[in-house]
Image (cartoon, grey):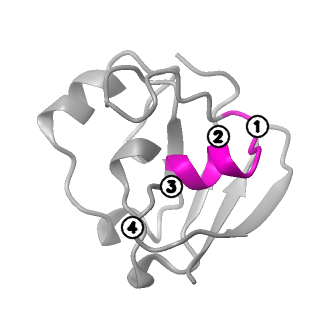
Amino acid sequence: MPKIVYIEADGTRKELEVEVGYTVMEGATMNGVEGVEAECGGACSCATCHVYVDEKWINKLPKKENAEEDMLDMANEPNKFSRLTCQITVTEDLDGLVVKMPSKQG
């Protein structure tokens, strides 16, 4: 099972196995990762699962859809490494993915 590394805003590092087919958001919410609120439950209609993807992983992810781009406009301090975890489906290729939570959500 792929491991996803979640780094909470305070620096706490959680390396968690997340089943293929789940989203990075689901991995966070099922395992109590602080900073992924996921208020819309993964419908890409809020920005409360916003993270910063480690630079070495950003180009290994699927391209952002327009809906995600629109929601990221509402995120707290988005940057070029910002993604919504509800839009990243875990695959074997993402084993070792590193995401960091912002200091606060949108």
Q: Judge whether 98 appears above or below 27 on screen.
A: below
Label 2 vs 4, first from the N-terminus? 4
Q: Which residues are magenta?
A: 25-35
Q: CA distance from mark 3 to mark 1?
A: 13 Å
Tell me if label 2 and label 1 are in contact, CB under 8 Å: yes
For image coordinates 42% across by 48% down, the residue present is: 81
Q: CA distance from mark 2 to mark 1?
A: 8 Å
Is 64 left, or right, of 78 in this rendering? left
Residue designated by label 2:
101
Place residue 75 in its image quadrant. Answer: top left
Amino acid type for the residue under numbered disc 2? Met
Q: Depth-wise, is mark 4 or mark 3 nearer the camera?
A: 4
Residue designated by label 1:
34
Q: CA distance from mark 2 to mark 4?
A: 22 Å
Label 4 vs 1, first from the N-terminus? 4
| Helix, strand or loop at mark 4 | loop
Can residue 12 be seen by looking at this rendering? yes
For image coordinates 53% across by 29% down, the residue present is: 38
Tell me if label 3 and label 2 are in contact, CB under 8 Å: no
Amino acid type for the residue under numbered disc 1? Glu
Neighbour class for label 4 at 10 Å: few (<14), some, many (≥20)?
few
Residue 86 position in % (x across, y down) = 41, 43
The image's mark for residue 24 is 3
The image's mark for residue 21 is 4
Place residue 59 in its image quadrant. Answer: bottom left
